[in-house]
Image: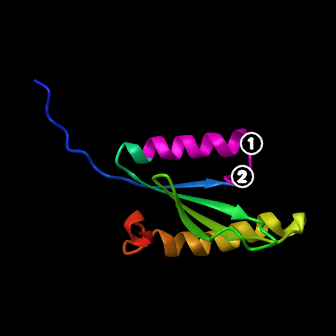
Amino acid sequence: MIEATTFRKLNILMVSDDFYPRVGGIAAHVLEISKAISQLGHNVVLLTKIYDPHHELPEEEMVDTVRVVRVRVSEKRKIRALQFMYKGRKKNKRTTSKRRFSSDSLA
């Protein structure tokens, strides 16, 4: 006899150095995987870097069914990775807190 399993909605944090609106294989792949996981019913937050000198991109937005959180980093290549690790860690703590994780909070 097969027992019925209950679906458990997971909170999933994806971290990517390269993401939309940058064009490339990694950015497209991360977006497609994130959308597929989200369409299975899980909460997906994607944490990525943003080096946007004109400040045109929002720090948080919904891309299809995926919540995207961007961390602003320097244009200087040598410190970009360190900034992403430090700022990303702080934003991750804030984003994944129970009261803010839901994608409904952006709507």
Name the N-terminal-most of marks 1 and 2: 2
Mark 1 burial class by Cα count in 10 Å: few <14, some 14-19, many 20+: few
* Image-based side of 75 in relation to 46, left or right: right
Q: Say which mark, if any, is on residue 95.
A: none
Residue at position x 45%, y 53% in the image = 65
Please state which of residues 12 and 50 is positioned toward the viewer in this rendering: 50
* Residue at mark 1: 24
Prevailing secondary structure class for the magenta stretch in the rendered image = helix
C-beta proximity under 8 Å, tags 1 and 2: yes
Label 2 crowd bin: few (<14), some (14–19), many (20+), radius 10 Å: some
**Residue 15 rendering spot, x and y as whole percentages:** 61, 55
Where are the magenta residues, as a range? Answer: 17-37
Q: How much space separates mark 1 and mark 2, taking CA atoms?
A: 8 Å
* Magenta segment includes 30: yes
Residue shown at 67% from the left, 52% from the top: 19
Say which of 90 and 64 sits in front.
Answer: 64
Q: Secondary structure at mark 1?
A: loop
Residue 2 versus residue 97 in the image, above or below: above
Q: Amino acid at mark 2?
A: Asp
Q: Quadrant of the N terminus?
A: top left
Disc 2 target residue: 18
Q: Residue 88, how many percent across, how many down? A: 64, 69
